[in-house]
Amino acid sequence: MNPPVDAATNASDYAPPPPGRRGQQTEVVPLQAGDGRPLTLLHVTGPGRAERGPVLLVHGAGVRAEIFRPPLPVTLVDALVEDGWDVWLLNWRASIDFDPVSWTLDDAAVHDYPPAVRHVLSATGATSLKAVVHCQGSTSFTMAMAAGLLPEVHTVVSNAVSLHPVIPAFSRVKIGYLAPLISRVTPYLSPAWGYKSSGLFPAALRTAVRLTHPECHNTVCRMVSFTYGSGHPALWSHDNLDETTHAWIDGEFAEVPMSFFAQMHDSVRAGHLVPTGRVPGLPADVAVRAPQTDARFVLLAGERNRCFLPESQRLTHEHLRRTRHHSHDTLHVLPGYGHLDVFFGRNAHRDTYPLILQELQR
């Protein structure tokens, strides 16, 4: 199991996995966002030559880039490297490798992704790249693309949600009524409170989650379900995870700010992403008008996703077809999969990775 990295803003404190996994090497590249926040890029190379060009992987909220490198025999990173891609993983401001800050999707869209894309292109000499983005990495990245901020991205594979968040009924209750109450007590929620916390509120919440989520003995797994969705569990099916990965998640989830939940609540109510209006560079109708990009969108939706329902990606696909007047964009509903098991399910190497590789190669 990988323990959480000490929450330091100095990117040099990050300790990548030791070299040797399938002949790979990881270079940690410190980077600065447009507003000065620290970011890191992890450049993963294999023994062979990367002939297909650069691909950027973007994680979701309250996790980190390592979410794409679970303790499986074959990870998505392995599959990409061995397929000839030049692989870059971004730790954006939502990463648990940094001190927690209050952030919004706007912050990431405007300040985090443009410098990351520019660096990858400069380092590789490529004129364009492709991306695999997940959850709130997907919403914020898609927001940046729709606003015309990432013209160098030619294909994006988006998992779970992009421009039109649709959540289960109980999640609507939690985000609409419970989240505002919690925000009066704490600026963050953290699934890591399942094994470490200080203060009365985290301890009380942990006890409440244990009582209401009896589905397994991993308290972090149960806290993840409370924080991010509706279900037992919400982000994956237990039968899709092997025991090692189920234990590994203990070190891969931490703080997510209540500022994010506030923006997502507004977006769910509106039926599409709603910028806060506090970050210049994003039009208010970014999720309503036609995207200001020629990039191709590949939308993935786990059929069992209880964080963002598959309807989320269906609505975005319909929006793209209605506003772009071409059939280049694709939608894939993945039977038997939920939210994150798309990437770290025990059979993902057989069920989902080949589809991602196929779409990137198009």
Image (spheres, rainbow, N blue to C red):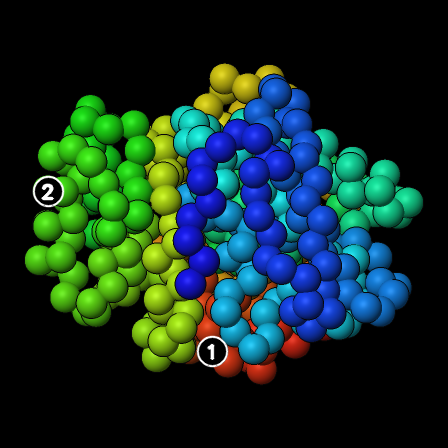
Judging by the rendered image, the residue that carries numbered circle 2 is 204
Q: Residue at x 23, y 41 (%)?
A: 197
Where's residue 101, x and y in %? Answer: 43, 27
Residue type indicated by callout 2: Ala
Where's residue 225, x and y in %? Answer: 27, 56
Report crowding for label 2: few under 14, some 14 to 19, many 20 or more residues within 10 A (C-alpha).
few
Q: Is residue 274 above or below residue 60?
A: above
Where's residue 264, x and y in %? Answer: 38, 37
**First along the sequence among labels 1 and 2:** 2
Q: Quadrant of the N terminus?
A: bottom left
Judging by the rendered image, the residue that carries numbered circle 1 is 346
Q: Is residue 256 above or below residue 207?
A: above
Q: Residue at x 37, y 44 (%)?
A: 254
Residue type indicated by callout 1: Arg
Q: Residue at x 58, y 64 (%)?
A: 331
> Does the rendering let one see residue 283?
no
What count of labels does the image hold? 2
